[in-house]
Image (spheres, rainbow, N blue to C red):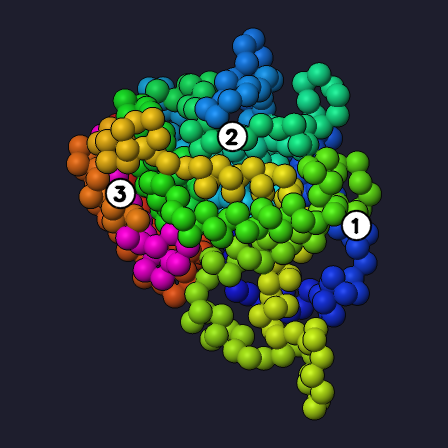
């Protein structure tokens, strides 16, 4: 999820439509991080070594790796820690520049650091790549523990609840006694809510952003369309494509799935104001089927950009986890589940979000009757992506909320 900038216009690889004339050998079969690649700032937790990790929906995994990064120092009491939970195509690199091992800058770089809203002079900040991801944590692109190739199609379906349980293990391994706050947007916000329900005595506060208590039919429709697009790509090969040479993986399907989702991340006003009806290839009095509008080139650019740093199977797995997300499953319904949350809560919504509309965040606040819960509105034309764009608004609300909790170092 990225802003509408100008880099897509000047990218030298983006002349005529890439699926028409691009060199397909420039696209890897998978953009996943692999052992042997530059580590960057990653650290790793190995868990489920002595006993298997049993998944909520059936199946189990052994020898799970979680890639994570930290900033700041943990206090002696283990109570000044903040856990950040990333969105669908995010990873552990929430803060810091792009470089070896990290193809993009930190996804919340403006929020995290000394003197910033999440002040690393005061807080010990942790961010981990989720189970099923592709930037260091165990996922479909990982090598199986028995050494028999990569998981591929054999990787089991995981849930948001599974991811939350592993994040709890990570906190315990780092010596965190109580999280000062757990914060995340979109898919990350789902993990925040699950952690608050499962471990209320270990979490002092939460900030779920642009998320929901359970996926709606329309949300499922959007994400499932993207999954079907990937599955229809011949390069997907049923999920076992990791040995394919460059240009022969499911890059076309993943790029198109990303284009579909990119539409839901923004609003009609933003697209219209930015692109209007501008054309890439001039009409010159003759219509052709594949003459493109500028908005088409923008979508192609972001789709192809994702292909170089993400994995198609992880996209399938994580969007499925989002669709399966239901805080009330096995707990007597959503209302009963929300009553379990006792942490202080700041729930943030975006007034222009068409993917996770703000009524869903307001419902979360209304249901948290046993928590000190408040609602904050991000006023933005940018839709769902606003939580990655409107740094000043969010920074102010996060600063005020964390300040009300008191000094974590006292």
Specify whether 101 is left or right of 177.
right
Q: Work out how far the residue at label 1 is from the one at label 3, CA to CA, in angstroms.
A: 44 Å
Q: Is residue 321 above or below residue 304?
A: above
Mark 2 — residue?
158
Mark 1 — residue?
247
| In magenta segment, residue 199 | no
Element type at mark 3? helix
Q: Work out how far the residue at label 1 is from the one at label 2, CA to CA, in angstroms.
A: 29 Å
Q: Please name the residue shown 35% across and 30% down the image.
A: 329
Contact between marks 3 and 2 (CB within 8 A): the answer is: no
| Residue 23 point in image, percent of width and height | 81, 58
Instruction: Give the camera-side residue of 338 and 238.
Output: 238
Packing grade of label 3 (10 A; few <14, some 14-19, many >=20) is: many
Write down the quadrant of residue 192 in the picture. top left
Residues in magenta, as a range: 342-359
Outermost top residue: 50
Q: Please name the residue shown 62% across and 28% down the image.
A: 155
Q: Please name the residue shown 55% across and 45% down the image.
A: 89
Specify whether 410 is left or right of 163.
left
| Residue 178 point in image, percent of width and height | 33, 24
> Mark 1 or mark 3, which has the lower sequence index?
1
Q: Please name the residue shown 51% across and 61% down the image.
A: 263
Q: Is residue 320 above or below residue 351?
A: above
Say whether residue 47 is visible.
no
Say whether residue 229 is visible.
yes
Instruction: Give the camera-side residue of 283 and 5.
Output: 283
Mark 3 — residue?
364
Specify the label residue 111 is tagged with: none
Quadrant in which the C terminus appears: top left
């Amino acid at each position: 999820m990225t802003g509408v900038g100008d880099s897509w216009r000047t990218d030298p690889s983006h002349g005529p439509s890439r699926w028409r004339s691009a060199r397909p050998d420039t696209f890897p079969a998978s953009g996943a991080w692999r052992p042997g690649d530059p580590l960057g700032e990653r650290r790793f937790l190995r868990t489920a070594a002595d006993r298997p990790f049993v998944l909520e929906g059936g199946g189990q995994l052994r020898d799970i790796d979680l890639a994570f990064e930290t900033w700041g120092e943990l206090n002696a009491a283990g109570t000044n820690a903040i856990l950040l939970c990333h969105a669908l195509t995010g990873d552990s690199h929430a803060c810091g520049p792009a470089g070896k091992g990290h193809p993009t800058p930190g996804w919340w770089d403006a929020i995290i650091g000394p003197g910033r809203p999440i002040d690393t002079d005061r807080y010990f900040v942790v961010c981990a790549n989720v189970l099923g991801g592709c930037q260091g944590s165990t996922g479909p692109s990982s090598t199986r523990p028995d050494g028999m190739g990569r998981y591929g199609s054999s990787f089991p379906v995981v849930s948001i609840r599974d991811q939350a349980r592993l994040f709890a293990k990570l906190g315990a391994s780092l010596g965190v006694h109580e999280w000062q706050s757990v914060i995340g947007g979109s898919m990350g916000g789902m993990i925040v809510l699950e952690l608050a329900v499962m471990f209320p005595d270990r979490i002092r506060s939460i900030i779920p952003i642009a998320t929901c208590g359970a996926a709606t039919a329309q949300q499922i429709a959007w994400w499932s369309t993207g999954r079907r697009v990937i599955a229809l790509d011949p390069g997907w090969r049923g999920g076992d494509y990791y040995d394919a040479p460059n240009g022969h993986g499911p890059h076309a399907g993943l790029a198109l799935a990303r284009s579909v989702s990119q539409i839901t991340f923004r609003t009609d006003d933003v697209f219209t104001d930015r692109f209007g009806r501008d054309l890439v290839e001039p009409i010159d009095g003759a219509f052709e089927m594949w003459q493109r509008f500028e908005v088409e080139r923008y979508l192609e650019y972001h789709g192809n950009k994702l292909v170089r740093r993400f994995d198609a199977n992880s996209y399938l797995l994580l969007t499925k986890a989002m669709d399966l997300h239901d805080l009330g499953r096995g707990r007597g319904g959503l209302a009963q589940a929300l009553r379990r949350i006792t942490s202080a809560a700041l729930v943030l919504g975006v007034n222009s979000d068409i993917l996770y509309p703000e009524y869903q965040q307001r419902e979360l606040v209304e249901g948290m009757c046993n928590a000190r819960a408040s609602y904050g509105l991000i006023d933005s034309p940018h839709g769902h992506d606003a939580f990655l764009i409107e740094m000043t608004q969010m920074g102010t609300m996060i600063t005020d909320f964390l300040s009300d909790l008191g000094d974590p170092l006292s």
